[in-house]
Amino acid sequence: MRSKDHSVFGFLQDSSTAIRHGSLDLGFGRSCAIWSNREDHVNYDELQGHAFSMYVRNGQDVWRVDQKPVRGWPGAVCIFPQGQSSEWEVNGPLTMMHLYLPDQELRRCYSEMMDRDGRQIELADVTYAKPEGLIVPFSRLFGETCAGNAMGAEEAMVELIAEVLLQKRFHGEQVKPIRGGLSMPVKRKLTDFIEDHLDKTIRLRDLAVIAELSEFHLQRSFKQTCGVSPSLFVAHRRVERAKSLMRAGEPLAQVADACGFSSQSHFTRSFKAGTGVTPASFRKAVA
């Protein structure tokens, strides 16, 4: 019986021939996996979340059925945007590296990296693009996944997403006017305030005062523009600061305090939710 998981990962997991050779939880709903497949017919139907793929080995006997049949090759890149449906014929061996990203994470990355409204990005449906600029991060993601190194894989993920966002061939922008949300000056005021107060309790009403909005409208407008809720945005920034402080050798107790975590257990739970590993494991990896 087919699962209700309409992600690329879910469809491959339901396949009788696809084999998962390794996968990593990268935190905040992000993950990566290495798959091999052969002699299969795969239908992706109204996908949930976005997927980024590169053929690591083979692929010459794989093609997309619902488009002009073009065969793949080692190094070929595919992008599966949320909502996409596609049909694939796999008539020979194939090994591929996949990165999975929830829609809100894509929009958060776009908003942060490009300093734009997260609703503007429209990820392209890409079949067999040349891997210029992506071969290094994809190759690193493959190596770190094989090694089971979640921290290294997360770093490769950040490099990969940044390169995708920098290359216009992989995405477009909304043509229709975007209504509501935050203006860019107000967004910057809010993110600057958050960055300056990560060691303290940040309340929704504090942000609402800065934006001159009600708490309800602030929460809705923030998510529209930044892709994620204020609380999730703060969680991201606290995890990033914690990683920076641990790389600098700060004791874990001081890191927890400097990042606004209420206790060591809160720090551990939040950090693992955001990275897939515990602070102790991260500290050991960077020591």
Image: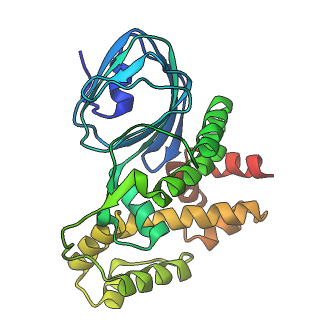
Vertical side of 270 occupied by 206: above or below: below
Q: Quadrant of the N terminus?
A: top left
Can residue 272 be seen from the camera position used here?
A: yes
Q: How many labels does the image show?
A: 0
Q: Position of residue 3 (x, y in %)?
A: 27, 24
Q: In screen coordinates, is 196 left or right of 14?
A: right
Q: Which colour scheme is used?
A: rainbow
Front-lying residue, 134 or 42:
134
User: Which percent across, then down, holds residue 227?
Assistant: 34, 63
Residue 269 visible at all? no
Q: Quadrant of residue 189?
A: bottom left
Instruction: Identify which residue, 6 or 60, lies in the foreground.
Output: 60
Depicted 105 relative to depicted 55: above or below: below
Q: In this view, does 69 lie above or below 47?
A: above
Is residue 107 found left or right of 248 in the rendered image?
A: left
Q: Which of 184 and 127 is in front in this view?
A: 127
At horizontal 64% and vertical 46% (from top left) the residue drawn is 151
x and y percentages locating residue 93 in the rendered image: 50, 13
Q: Which residue is drawn at 40% across and 8% down?
A: 39
**From the viewer's perspective, is 119 left or right of 79?**
left
Instruction: Locate residue 35 relative to residue 281 in the image: left or right.
Output: left
Residue at left offset 46%, top offset 25%: 72
Question: Is residue 149 positioned above or below 74 on the image?
Answer: below
Q: Residue 73: x, y in percent?
A: 51, 26
Residue drawn at point x = 41 percent, y = 19 percent: 62
